[in-house]
Image (cartoon, helix red, strand yellow):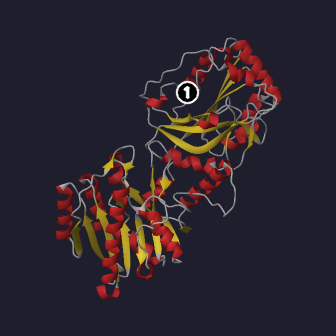
Amino acid sequence: MSEFKKRVLVGSPVHQKPSILEPFLRSLQRLACNTIDIHFFFIDDNENNESSAMLTSFQEKNQNVKIESSQLADVYLRDEHTHYWNDRLVWKVAGFKNHIINHCLEEKYDYLFLIDSDLLLEPETVEHLIQTEKDIISEVFWTRWQPNTELSPQVWLMDEYTQWEQRRGEVLTEDEKYKRHMEFINKLKEKGVYEVGGLGACTLLSQKALEKGVNFKQIKNLSFWGEDRHFCIRAAALGIPLYVDTHMPAFHIYRDSDLAYVDEFMTKEKTQVSAKEEKKNKLTLSMIVKNEGNRYLKEALEKHKQYIDEAVIIDDGSTDNTVDICLETLKGIPIHLVRNEHSKFSNEIELRKQQWEETIKRNPEWILNLDADEIFESGFATGVKEILDQEEFDVVCFRLYDFWNKTHYREDEYWRAHFVYRPFLIRYKKDFKYTWKETPQHCGRLPENVFELKSMLSQWRIKHFGWADKEARVAKYKRYEELDPESRYGWHEQYVSILDESPNLVRWTE
């Protein structure tokens, strides 16, 4: 029946350690062949003899497997931080890929599927990509290119790795770039087929595309790094659009630590995907409030109630309707309310410890610690689920923007909080011994040793309205004068700058 099937060559240059090569080959061996006839072509560029032996064993156990030795020796370094490529390695691999392309053309295969040797595939991936009827299409995969960062796809929209839409001549602020970047990332999390400007590592090419001349040769008048950029620009110049499919994301073994998740990927059933989507991780909002009735509390709680499961509220001696706002706005959500008859804020460490102890009494899974004037940007209500569902990181850090009015945040030498990622969301671990910074002011909202746990940086941003009107700024300035007159716990110059008449303000965009 093979004459009625599309002939597909799966090609891969292999320079890989055995622990990663083994699941890669196992992944290839289980590829579905209901409508296609698969052949394999490996270029053996291994330093490790065991890896070469694994390729030979794969050839012995499977039909239609071709192996060629590269006869080249180069050292390729990788560690838990990143991979280390040099120019010689890049163009050596480009030559290997072009050799595979030439073989594919000579043998008149219908398709070539190029795949890196640290990727794992769903069994139906190749058949599914063929069904999209695209001449060049990659299956998406997601990678933390640097430790403790969010997952990013291997596809982009323009240039070397630009992941936001930008028309020719259009000037964008950093916030506008960020907004469009998040739109692109969130789109790729939805199942579909999307046109992109760059791709690689897990790509199906039709015979038509190959015959038009797509290849990985270096374009001499182009300085972009990496053979995939040159491939993609050449394809675009030849009039061949590039696409990414997101129905069956591949798994990238980028670091040795990723090996711990191989079995989960290889054994999961489709039904488990939907089960995972239904998984619920309890999120507990922890907040201190005091006389917030005429400020931002109601607006903040309206946003938070879209994604929290319960709330722990410490009312630190309010004399207005703050408590009523909490109870009314969060109606239908379990609330653990503690009321302090007298405020404890003059000794903040006592107040923060009280907040912590009352919160962990609720047996939380995740704790989100926000003040009454802090609000996440639009989209967080849906985006937070992905953070809660991941199992690798226990501490999540965000950037906080100090607003000086409703539409602008302050940015100068004294006000740069948004340049730093800080922890606001943590997974509570009962067996971990939490410790605090024992200072009466600026002790931190969370225990100081949370970074002993594994942390990640999130691109979601927090708007802080605590400085957003002049009356509040004056009140805070006077409070710091009273509670920290010698600036022992804070920064004197920043205290003074609170009253600046014309600070540098930047418009917020979402």
Please tell me whether mark 1 sits on a helix, a strand or a loop: loop
| Residue 502 visible in rendering | yes
In this view, which residue lies farthest toward the front? 221
Q: Nearer the viewer, residue 410 or 317?
A: 410
Q: Residue at x 68, y 28 (%)?
A: 414
Q: Residue 349: where, in percent of width, then height?
A: 59, 18
Measured along the vertical axis of the image, is residue 85 above or below residue 210?
A: above
Q: Nearer the viewer, residue 448 or 335?
A: 448
- Left or right: residue 325 versus residue 130 is right
Q: Name the amino acid type tagged 1.
A: Leu
Q: Quadrant of the N terminus?
A: bottom left
Q: Residue 17: where, in percent of width, then height?
A: 26, 53
The quarter of the picture where residue 79 lies is top left
Q: Which residue is mark 1?
A: 446
Q: Nearer the viewer, residue 191 or 55?
A: 55
Q: Nearer the viewer, residue 308 or 377?
A: 377
The quarter of the picture where residue 289 lies is top right
Neighbor class of circle 1 (other Cα within 10 Å; few <14, some 14-19, many 20+) is many
